[in-house]
Image (tube, rainbow, N blue to C red):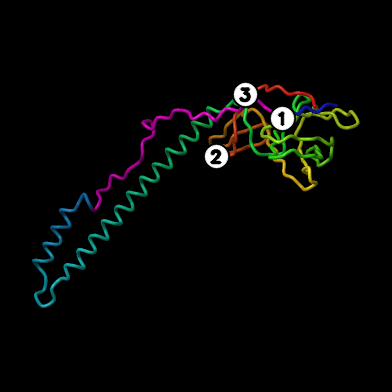
């Protein structure tokens, strides 16, 4: 069998599609607010002052404070309406951006990917050179391949598997998980993060936020780390 391992081409930042907010109209209430009926409140206040009991005069300060409180409540309600509109616009923008990513080649955090046409690829990142024991498991948890490798310091280093086990058995296409146990030059345990790379082939807009489908897995927009050029070359170790 052969395992390819290389540094991927320079990734491209995720696109930020132009979005026009003109098409998204916020919903506002048609019910008159306190500020719209301020003259009515002034009339009520004047009427109460005219008809108050001389022996028990109305506390105008208290009445004014109540008006101020009512106005504050109205302002809070209008702020909530504005916030709801902003949330709606954000949701629409996320859906638009997600749709534009269909067909893109993306890198997301993860250790499970698909073997398709006898090829599965992961991206590895480590901040220092390490010696690594690599194992690949099937969906049933069976170890189908294992080996030792030296991984250089760097990000987004491609690690490809051709679907063959240590004994030469060719495993069927499906989901496979990569696990790595690594040590640095001093023998201390080191961390190697794994990411998967694949084509975004569908978007589920019925979910909030929208779900992006990569192979048999789904991810949200914020889980995408990078977009990379498709068909990045790999060199044999």
Label 2, on which residue? 207
Q: Which residues are magenta?
A: 6-34
Q: Are marks 2 and 3 in contact (CB under 8 Å)?
A: no
Q: State the residue lying farthest toward the bottom.
A: 55
Using residue 101 as the reference point, say whether residue 157 is left or right of it. right
- Looking at this view, is 95 or 183 the one in front? 183
Quick check: 45 above or below 181? below
Q: Quadrant of the C terminus?
A: top right
Q: Secondary structure at mark 3?
A: loop
Which residue carries the number 1 mark?
Answer: 158
Element type where label 2 sits in the image:
loop
Left or right: 74, with 214 as reference point = left
- The residue indicated by pointer 3 is 229
At a point 74% along the width and 34% down the height, the residue shown is 152
Q: Give the quarter of the image for residue 42.
A: bottom left
Q: Is label 2 or label 1 in front?
A: 1
Nearest the viewer among 56 and 93 is 93
């Amino acid at each position: 069998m052969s395992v390819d391992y290389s540094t991927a081409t320079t990734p491209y930042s995720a696109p930020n599609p132009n979005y026009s907010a003109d098409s998204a109209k916020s919903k506002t209430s048609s019910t008159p607010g306190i500020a719209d009926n301020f003259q009515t409140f002034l009339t009520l206040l004047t009427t109460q002052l005219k008809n108050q009991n001389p022996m028990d005069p109305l506390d105008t300060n208290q009445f004014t404070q109540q008006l101020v409180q009512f106005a504050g409540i109205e302002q809070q309600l209008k702020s909530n309406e504005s916030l709801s509109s902003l949330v709606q616009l954000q949701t629409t923008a996320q859906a638009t951006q997600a749709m534009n990513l269909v067909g893109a080649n993306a890198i997301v955090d993860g250790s499970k990917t698909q073997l398709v046409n006898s090829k599965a690829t992961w991206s590895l990142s480590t901040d220092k050179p390490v010696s690594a024991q690599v194992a690949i498991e099937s969906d049933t948890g069976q170890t189908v391949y294992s080996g030792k490798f030296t991984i250089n310091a760097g990000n987004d280093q491609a690690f490809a598997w051709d679907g063959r086990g240590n004994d030469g058995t060719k495993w069927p296409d499906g989901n496979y998980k990569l696990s790595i146990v690594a040590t640095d030059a001093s023998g201390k345990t080191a961390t190697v993060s794994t990411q998967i790379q694949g084509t975004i082939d569908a978007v589920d807009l019925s979910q909030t936020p929208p779900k992006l489908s990569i192979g048999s897995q789904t991810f949200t927009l914020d889980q995408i780390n990078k977009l990379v050029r498709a068909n990045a070359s790999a060199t044999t170790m």
